[in-house]
Amino acid sequence: MPRGIARDHEEKRAAIRKGAAAYFAEHGFDRASMTAAAKHCGVSKALIYHYYDSKEALLYDILDHHLSKLVAEVEAAPETDGLRGLVRAILVAYKGADAEHKLQLDSLTVLEPAQQAPLVDLQRRLIDMMGAALKAEAPERFENGANLRAVTMSVFGILNWYYMWNRPGKGLNREDYADLVTDLVVGGIHNL
């Protein structure tokens, strides 16, 4: 008779995802091993292979969970707050996910194209939301889509590196930084 799924199956998977993401981000996915990831997670190699048949399967699950959660949180942000609300929602959603975010930026291309495709689609949803918010902020500046992609990707460039230089408790918190970024972007797009 096949074994049923343990009651704590999802909790264990989540803990493995979180621990492995931290390990992979710190040591580099290409140099990391499943044995060392399991050790870092405080589980046996056999347990990690019970949940994931390969390092790439684990990476995919980490990125899929991270991006799906990010998109859901950003989509749940009130649209009435416009660009400012979207920038804030993105930065708040990034909180606690620095390792996952680093893996997204550094290791997505390690995956096979078929695995990359749904993850890239999630990234595109975020890009489309930002583009729409920018266009709503200054429709006259983005007629015919002129400069919209460049400005959209510039905003993500600003937001995506916050985790690299920010030290919690020093300088601006995420909400204040979101306001600063929004003010810079709005001031800039009205002067294009």
Image: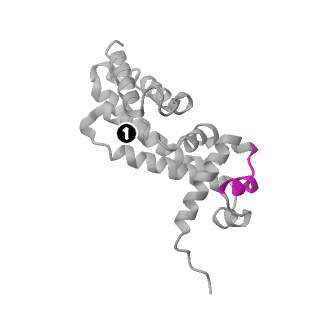
Q: Give the residue displayed 69% in from the left and 53% down from the top.
A: 40
Q: SS of the residue at dot 1?
A: helix
Q: Is residue 35 magenta?
A: yes
Image-based side of 75 in relation to 4, left or right: left
Residue 5: give x, y in percent of width and height.
56, 75
Residue 21: give x, y in percent of width and height.
61, 48
95 is higher (above) or lower (below) than 34 = above
Residue on which disc 1 sits: 89
Magenta segment, prevailing SS (helix, strand or loop): helix
Magenta-colored span: 31-41
Farthest residue toward the left?
Answer: 80
Tell me, yes or no, if residue 145 can be seen here. Answer: no
Q: Give the residue displayed 61% in from the left and 81% down from the top.
A: 3
Q: Is residue 84 magenta?
A: no
Image-based side of 53 in relation to 91, left or right: right
Q: Give the residue displayed 41% in from the left and 33% down from the top.
A: 174
Image-based side of 155 in relation to 40, left or right: left
Farthest residue toward the top?
Answer: 191
Residue type at mark 1 is Ala
